[in-house]
Image (cartoon, rainbow, N blue to C red):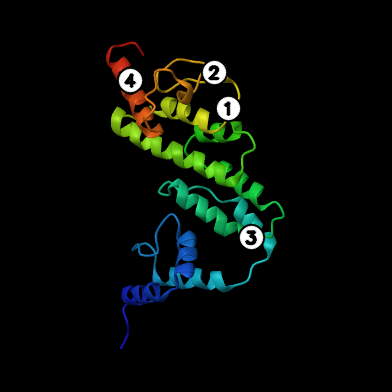
Amino acid sequence: MDVPESKRKTIILTCLPPQIYSALEDLCLPAYPEDDSVTYEDIEENIMKLFKPKSSLILRFEFATIKKASNENVTEFSRRITRAAEGCKFTDRDDRMRDQFITGFNDGVTIKRLLLESEELIFRKAVEIAVTLERVTQEARQLDGSENVMIGATSLLSRTSGASDINKVKCFNCGKLGHFARDCEEKCKTCSHDHQAKNYFKRLQGLKGKGRI
């Protein structure tokens, strides 16, 4: 009795260990293994690739071509970078992961600029900054209802990334230049960073409604 291809695909995906399935996901990007566009033959071929030894030179080449997929969040992208670096035998692994993490972004230059301005940036810190920017940007879009939200997000991350020119820093609590929100006299001491960011974007929205910006 012949087993339908769709059923064979379901069976093999169900039986895969978590580590193998995670690696298979990377090979199937931007699709997922369960998608109809990914056939049983595709799954079989990609699994064979996983068990075929590769030289560190090939792995390094593949590592250098990693880009963030449009349907991939920052955390998922950072994990893929980490997994890809495992077999590369880098002597400066953290620096390589940090550099590829920054250059792998394809959704604008703002996050790259913020990361490059950060002092003594390590891979873990780069991920933290990018995750914060991603979260604040998403929350700002919900408040503002538009894509033009990077100004406020950049103000938040200027403090997080360690930008050195204090005169150019804009407080997202009061909107004035020359200090961070943590040093703002008007800041409520019990406010969290996320709450301050929301207030900042609400204020921007109000200024737009009054025609001031």
Q: Is mark 3 on a helix, strand or loop?
A: helix
Mark before the other along the chain sequence, 2 or 4: 2
**Residue that numbered label 2 is attached to:** 168
Question: 142 or 55: which is nearer to us?
Answer: 142
**Residue that numbered label 3 is attached to:** 59
Numbered badge on residue 163: 1
Mark before the other along the chain sequence, 4 or 1: 1
Residue 73 position within the rendered picture, expressed as x and y whole percent measured from the top left: 43, 47
Q: What element carries label 1?
A: loop
Is the residue under label 3 in contact with that under label 1 (CB below 8 Å)?
Answer: no
Mark before the other along the chain sequence, 1 or 2: 1
Residue 101 position within the rendered picture, expressed as x and y whole percent measured from the top left: 56, 46
Q: Gap in Å between the C-alphas at discs 4 and 3?
A: 48 Å
Is the residue under label 2 in contact with that under label 1 (CB below 8 Å)?
Answer: yes
Residue 106 position within the rendered picture, expressed as x and y whole percent measured from the top left: 50, 41
Q: Specify the amino acid type for callout 1.
A: Ala
Q: Gap in Å between the C-alphas at discs 2 and 3?
A: 42 Å
Mark before the other along the chain sequence, 2 or 3: 3
